[in-house]
Image (tube, rainbow, N blue to C red):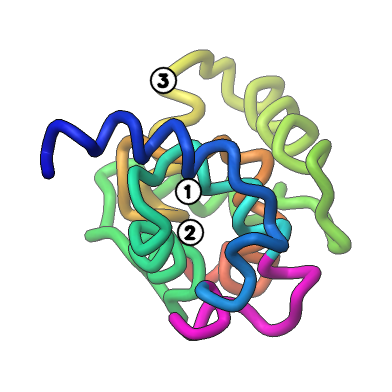
């Protein structure tokens, strides 16, 4: 079975949202087909099986801080203050990180990794420009604070 995982992952990565919507709904993911479609498009490249989406849902839907307090607390507080207003779109992440870069001079991992950790609890995963709109402003502020 483990030998089939790479093949299954390639198939999962190509599945359109409508092919997995009922499975995602059955896992309790999202509120509405439009949200689930955006969620699936954001996370599918990070799933070997459709069921792996549930772990990404937990990271997105957590009500508060998902990672231990970071030693970068001042940076995260500034990030919360500079977070753009909703509605978020795929440009919100780059706008936000651009403001943070201009304000702090941070680049690369020093700019992005503390944000990813605070927002998802992980060092890796789907593109944050797709995840930020799914997490939303209120949850993002709670996770950064």
3D distance between C-alphas at marks 2 and 1:
5 Å
Residue 24 horizontal/vertical position (percent):
53, 73
Confirm whether the magenta stretch covers residue 27. Answer: yes
Q: Decide which of 32, 20 is in the foreground and name it.
A: 20
Marks 3 & 2, CB-CB < 8 Å contact: no
Q: Residues within 10 Å of mark 3 (few under 14, many from 20)?
A: few
- Disc number at residue 133? none
Residue 131 horizontal/vertical position (percent):
60, 50
State the SS at label 2. Answer: helix
Q: Residues within 10 Å of mark 1 (few under 14, many from 20)?
A: many
Q: Which residue is mark 1?
A: 76
The magenta segment: 24-36
Tell me if I can see residue 120 in this picture: yes
Q: Earlier in the sequence, mark 3 or mark 2?
A: 3
Q: Is residue 103 left or right of residue 27?
A: right
- Disc number at residue 144? 2
Q: For the N terminus, give its image quadrant.
A: top left
Q: Decide which of 105, 88 is in the foreground and name it.
A: 88
Marks 2 & 1, CB-CB < 8 Å contact: yes
Q: Which residue is mark 3?
A: 109
Residue 18 horizontal/vertical position (percent):
72, 62
């Amino acid at each position: 079975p483990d030998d089939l995982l790479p093949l299954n992952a390639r198939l999962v990565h190509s599945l359109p949202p409508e092919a997995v919507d009922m499975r995602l709904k059955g896992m309790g993911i999202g509120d509405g087909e439009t949200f689930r479609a955006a969620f699936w498009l954001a996370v599918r490249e990070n799933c070997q099986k459709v069921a792996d989406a549930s772990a990404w849902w937990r990271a997105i839907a957590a009500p508060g801080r998902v990672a231990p307090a970071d030693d970068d607390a001042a940076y995260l507080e500034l990030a919360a203050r500079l977070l753009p207003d909703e509605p978020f779109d795929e440009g919100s992440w780059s706008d936000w990180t651009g403001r943070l870069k201009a304000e702090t001079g941070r680049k690369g991992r020093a700019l992005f990794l503390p944000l990813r950790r605070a927002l998802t609890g992980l060092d890796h995963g789907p593109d944050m420009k797709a995840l930020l709109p799914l997490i939303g402003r209120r949850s993002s502020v709670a996770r950064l604070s």
